Image (tube, grey):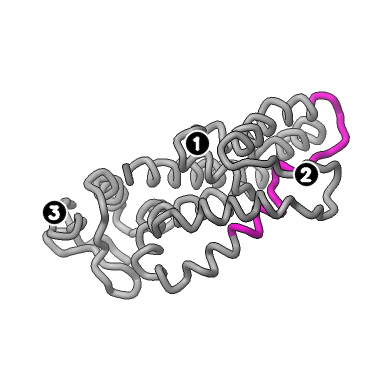
Amino acid sequence: MKRFWRDVGVVAEAEGFVVTLDARTVRTPKRQPLLLPTRALADLVAAEWRAQGETVQPDTMPINRLATSVVDLMPERRPAALEQLLGYARTDLLCYRAAGPENLLAAYRQHWDPPLTWLARTHGPELRVVEGLMPAAQNEAVIEGLQQRLVALDDWRLVGVHGITTVTASLVLGLMVEAGALTAEAAAAAALVDEHAQQARWGQEAEALGRERRLRGDVHAASSYLGALG
């Protein structure tokens, strides 16, 4: 889509805020008004539209994408999103570890142990940590506690947690960022522990660096989105 507007604005309405392009309200792919719950989130979405060049690049608008997902897909897809997130709880990245070498084990202790400790402190029993990649049954009491936590989130916050969880393969990291207990950069660093170990052993490749940039960008965007919800 070619850029057709000059000015981007934010307008307060009775039920929230909308972003305008030359006084036209931004709409979702399903042609619904993109009604946002906070001024801070509207400002972030407006900034993404303002930053567009002559041609709109949707890949450079991750916060707009998260917001439109809420308006267009929720609450119809909420049950499926909850089920997917619980699937990540059963196979959380932080629970599956290599046997070595020592520098990788040290990285696990630095980046993965604190989030699991936080989870146990805030949600009860610990998730089971195993060596290797074979699926391991988790404590169902933990899964039930996580389910209750997810159900308590509104659609806006659930989409933010989903955004972080799916790119990091860790529900623990998603919930920790949502709670304000972990920065986006720390979450990205945790998600990249195994990747960085491979790079240290075999060297950096352009494809791997591209994946890392995308992951960091997605995590930072979802974190900013969650922070703007207040």
Q: Is residue 13 left or right of residue 157?
A: left
User: Toward the viewer: 7 or 194?
Assistant: 194
Cα distance between the residues tagged 3 and 1: 29 Å
**Location of mark 1 (residue):** 184
In the image, the segment drawn in magenta is 85-103
Residue 22 lies, in percent from the top left, at: 13, 59
Task: Please tell me whether mark 1 sits on a helix, a strand or a loop.
Answer: helix
- In this rendering, the label closer to the viewer, 2 or 1: 2
Mark 3 is on which residue type?
Val
> Residue shown at 60%/34% (left/top)?
121
Which label is found at residue 54? none
> Residue shown at 66%/59% (left/top)?
87
Please state, as top left, top right, bottom left or bottom right, where the C terminus lies in the image: top left
Residue 44 lies, in percent from the top left, at: 30, 46
**Location of mark 2 (residue):** 96
Mark 2 is on which residue type?
Tyr
Question: For residue 127, which quarter of the picture?
Answer: top right
16 is within the stretch colored magenta: no
Q: Residues within 10 Å of mark 2 (few under 14, many from 20)?
A: some
* Up-down relation of residue 219 to residue 199 (above or below): below
Residue 165 lies, in percent from the top left, at: 57, 50
Q: Are marks 2 and 1 in contact (CB under 8 Å)?
A: no
> Residue shown at 26%/54% (left/top)?
37
**Location of mark 3 (residue):** 11
Q: Is residue 225 left or right of residue 124?
A: left
Please state, as top left, top right, bottom left or bottom right, where the N terminus lies in the image: bottom left
- In this rendering, the label closer to the viewer, 2 or 3: 2
> Residue shown at 39%/56% (left/top)?
154
